[in-house]
Image (spheres, rainbow, N blue to C red):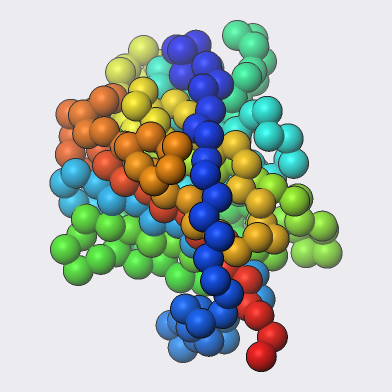
């Protein structure tokens, strides 16, 4: 299990985008928040409501660790995700913020507590792509300062492996990178930009690296920081 904690890190290239022209004033009939974080994944098969899809974000301000999958082992924690770099006897640390898609709905959690739905959560008509857009203010407790940068990963699971019954069960999963255990270590929240797998120095997401289940096998990801500009 420890191999999942190897903190291989994707080097992300920052693609500066040009300002306000492409930003819609509203989405889903709601006024757009001033600062949002958008992320989408594409899977080899189709987004399947019976499986689990997590957008996991670490808000501790430390680029040296970030969200990675839990695969199997004696420490299962929440059964899907932890923060990298923990020792063998350290308790699992749940990513401080995440959005979960399961059974057809999107739910946001902060510090383990349900805090509502994301600003936008969509599955494409062909069911191959899932998009989540969150108000950056949702990342931290009301009144708390946002970190300058976050660490981000998508973690997909065929099931949530929880103790005690499922200890030792090997499950199928995926995460960023060829082995499914890397994460984006530096996503500045105050710079309008797009990071995308296969663009610049970010490696392509390859199919069938850690899973044979096409519906949870990520083959592409994109992360976009959007800032409303005053007009
Ligand atoms: Ca961190
Ligand atoms: Ca993959």
**Where in the figure is residue 31, as x and y percent of width and height?**
57, 86
Q: Is residue 107 something one can see in this rendering?
A: no
Quarter assignment of residue 77: top right
Q: Is residue 127 something one can see in this rendering?
A: yes
Q: Quadrant of the N terminus?
A: top left
**Count of marks overlaid on the render:** 0
Of residues 204 and 112, the one nearer the viewer is 204
Residue ID at (18%, 51%) = 46
Taking 47 as reference, is 194 left or right?
Answer: right
Residue ID at (63%, 71%) = 227
Taking 28 as reference, is 17 left or right?
Answer: right
Residue ID at (46%, 70%) = 120
Quarter assignment of residue 228: bottom right
**Where in the figure is residue 166, as x and y percent of width and height?**
36, 21
**Where in the figure is residue 107, as x and y percent of width and height?**
48, 59
Residue ID at (35%, 67%) = 122
């Amino acid at each position: 299990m420890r191999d999942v904690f190897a903190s291989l890190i994707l080097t992300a290239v920052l693609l500066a985008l040009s300002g306000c022209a492409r930003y819609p004033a509203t989405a889903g009939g709601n006024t757009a928040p001033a600062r949002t974080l958008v992320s989408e994944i594409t899977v080899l098969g189709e987004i399947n409501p019976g499986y689990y899809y997590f957008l996991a974000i670490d808000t501790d301000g430390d680029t040296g660790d970030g969200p990675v999958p839990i695969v199997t082992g004696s420490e299962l924690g929440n059964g899907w995700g932890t923060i990298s770099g923990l020792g063998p006897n350290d308790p699992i640390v749940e990513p401080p913020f995440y959005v979960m898609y399961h059974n057809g709905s999107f739910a946001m959690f902060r510090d383990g507590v349900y805090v509502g739905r994301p600003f936008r959560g969509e599955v494409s008509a062909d069911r191959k792509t899932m998009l989540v857009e969150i108000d950056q203010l949702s990342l931290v407790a009301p009144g708390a300062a946002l970190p300058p940068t976050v660490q981000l990963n998508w973690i997909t699971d065929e099931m949530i492996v929880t103790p005690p019954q499922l200890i030792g069960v090997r499950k199928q999963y995926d995460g960023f990178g060829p082995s499914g255990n890397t994460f984006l270590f530096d996503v500045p929240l105050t710079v309008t930009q797009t990071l995308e797998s296969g663009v610049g120095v970010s490696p392509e997401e390859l199919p069938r690296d850690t899973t044979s289940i096409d519906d949870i096998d990520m083959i592409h990801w994109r992360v976009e920081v959007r800032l409303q500009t005053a007009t």
